[in-house]
Amino acid sequence: MFTPRFATSLGSASASNRASQCLRQQRVQATRSSRPATRNSVPCRTQQQRWQSTRGAQPKINRSKGSFTRNAKILFKAHPYSMTGATIAIGFGVFCLGYINWWYNKYIIDGFKAFPEPVAKQLRKALYYTNMSLEPKNAIKYYKEALRVADEMGMDPFSDEYLGIKISVCVLLEKIQAYDKAIGVYEIMRDDCGKWMEQLGDLERNIGKRTRVLRRMVEISVKIADLYNGEYVLQPDKAEESLVYAVETILKEQMRRQKEGIRPGEEVWLSDEEMGGTFEALAHHYEATDKHHLAAPLFLQAIALSTPATCHTAVLMNNLSISLAQQNPPPELGQPIISRSQQIKNARAWATKSLEICAKIAPPERTEECDLGCAVATHNLGEFAEMDGDIKEARKRYEEARSLASAMGFKEGEAQSEERMAKIVVSLRGSKSIALSQFQPGLSNTSFIWMSIARAVTNPNPTQAQSHSYKNKKEENTSSLLITKLEQNRAQHERNTI
């Protein structure tokens, strides 16, 4: 049969192509088989084994203790400034971390151990808004919440912890200058303590608690008086009432203890220093209101309770000498009238004793209070000599006081002493304008300035000298209690002090 020529040519071409491909593949295989074996021809398992053996044969790194030090030295040499800054930053961070931890445990945790945790939680918030971020509304809110939680948990409303919360409220009110409200809170606290004393204070089971509540009443009364005497309130009559209440409470309790003795279970009462401070506060108040006949026994009682041979005792003796020199008791007190010369003699004796104590005190016990007390006593001795007409002695004392004031750098005291000496010089020259017979029987205006200096040493917030109404009943009660107490201690006190 006839076959077309075109189809035959296509078939022969495809056959020749297949034959050429087969020949090419055979040549490639022959070439591969004739080449030498290479690394890639190693089996995979053999390569893994070789890698493991090579890894195990690597040298070990020397991790000795000195490696860190050597590396640090290398880094410091390479980057001295950067490494120094980094070291300081790391050290400061460690210090801050430790300090914060210490502060948190001391003031946040340990400071509230006496309170149950629910109460402490509210107190922390209240103190934050009191001391850290002053927000009175929030602080009062959390203080009230703390008191509410304390009541729910059955805390004793007359315990130191419970009363401490109320005192913190008063501190906040003082900080925002709400002094009237602070006084109101203090007075409520004192009244509540007084009611408890009347109703439950004499029970046998409350012996220890009674002492604690009575002590708190005295402390609160002194604080109320301090606020009344403040420059933003200025109600000295109410301050006097509060101080008289505190002194009477102390004297009554002291007389009870002397009569009945200390009962088993009674807690620690006020120390001699605390009682003396209360007497001194009332004495300064009477001195400022020109009631020296009431200030003198209080200063004497404070001296009897103070530590002997101290700077503060010397200052108290000098204050007593000033009160004795200016005494003018009213006739209705019924006390024997002391002559003017005897008053000055007694005042000079106490001022001299003050100088003797100051001379015996050496550093480090000797403080600026001693130096100031010595200068004041010396000036007062000049005043007393001038009252007696001993001009030579007065001039000598004024010169000594001026030298002491100059050595201390107290310009005002130096100027006052010079002023007194100038008046004496004029009188010695025969000036008729300033005769000694015309001097008033009492301390001059200069001595009042020195008195204020002495009060500033013993009382950081002295009150202004103003005249106020005389409350006969309160002062007579206080005076009678003081006289009773002083008669018991007079013999011992005279042996120790004069």
Image (cartoon, rainbow, N blue to C red):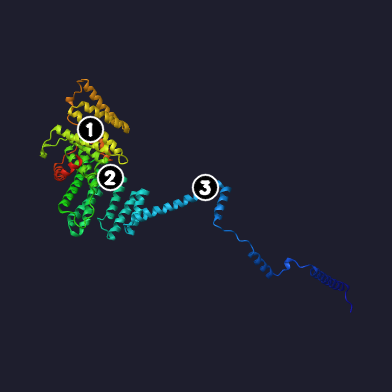
Front: mark 1 or 2: 1
Residue type, mark 3 in image:
Gly
* Residue designated by label 1: 380
Instruction: State whether residue 444 appears in this view.
Output: no
Pick whichever, 271 or 279, lies toward us.
271
Disc 2 crowd, CA 10 A, few/some/many (<14, 14-19, 20+): many
Q: Position of residue 109 (x, y in %)?
A: 36, 56
* Residue designated by label 2: 179
Q: Position of residue 209 (x, y in %)?
A: 22, 56
Question: Which mark is first along the chain, 2 or 1?
Answer: 2
Q: Residue at x 25, y 29 (%)?
A: 398
Secondary element at tag 1: helix
Quadrant the N terminus occupies: bottom right
Place residue 276 in its image quadrant.
Answer: top left
Q: Position of residue 278 (x, y in %)?
A: 22, 45
Cα separation, mark 3 vs mark 1, equals: 63 Å
Q: Position of residue 94 (x, y in %)?
A: 46, 52
- Mark sitting on residue 85: 3
Q: Residue at x 16, y 51 (%)?
A: 258
Residue type, mark 2 in image:
Tyr
Pick whichever, 72 or 65, lies toward us.
65
Question: Which mark is first along the chain, 2 or 3?
Answer: 3
Cα separation, mark 1 vs mark 2, equals: 37 Å
- Mark sitting on residue 97: none
